[in-house]
Image (spheres, rainbow, N blue to C red):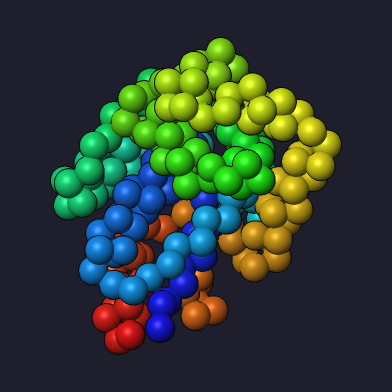
Amino acid sequence: MSTTIEFYFDFGSPMAYLAHKRFDYLREKYDVNIEYRPMLLGGVHKATKNQPPAAIPVKGMYLLKHDVPRFVKRYQVPFKMNPHFPVNTLPLMRGCFAAEKLGVAEAYNNVMFDALWNQGLNMADPEVIKQVLLDNDLPADELLAATQDPAVKQQLIDATEAAVKRNCFGAPTMFVEGEMFFGQDRLDFVEEILQQG
């Protein structure tokens, strides 16, 4: 029987990118299903009175200069520090719901994560977003138009509030069999559950 990992994420988190990439390894090795649950990280931080690591200079520097490179090496995944970080991901996260409706959610998630953390693009720029979508054969006009749809905007608000109700305070946050794991560096514990079947 397949085990489900609920993955609460925001594209703007390099740690969420690392978890997203690590899921490829977990899928190859175990019978696992990843459910992507978009949330707006800024909204989660505000609601929980949390701060992003970059807001604490010493912590941010450690994370980006030491922690991220260590996991990039361990996971053997491509990574490029985004020179535009931190990036306003509001339109990208709204796009998750539009992509789901259009049946292209998996491709959309892959493209957005890679654009930010493999290519280092300025994904706060609408023209860059559009070009990335076009370059990857995704329905750019439909996706971008949908990010302005009040119903899609509300979906992101509701999803963010739902994440906070589940005690999410940052990204990535994962739930496996009802147990919460914060941070991609907790994937070793997630794998222990998968090993037990």
Residue 134 visible (yes or no): yes
Which residue does the image show at 68% across and 52% down from the upper left? 160
In front of the other: 191 or 184 = 191
Q: Position of residue 95 (x, y in %)?
A: 62, 36
* Quarter of the rendering containing residue 191: bottom left
Q: Is residue 19 above or below residue 134?
A: below
Q: Position of residue 47 (x, y in %)?
A: 71, 52
Q: Position of residue 123 (x, y in %)?
A: 50, 23
Q: Which residue is outermost to the right? A: 150
Which residue does the image show at 58% across and 33% down from the upper left? 92
Answer with left or right where residue 45 lies relative to residue 62: right
Image quarter where the N terminus lies is bottom left
Residue 11 visible (yes or no): no
Answer with left or right where residue 111 lies relative to residue 78: right
Answer with left or right where residue 122 lies relative to residue 66: right
In front of the other: 191 or 108 = 108
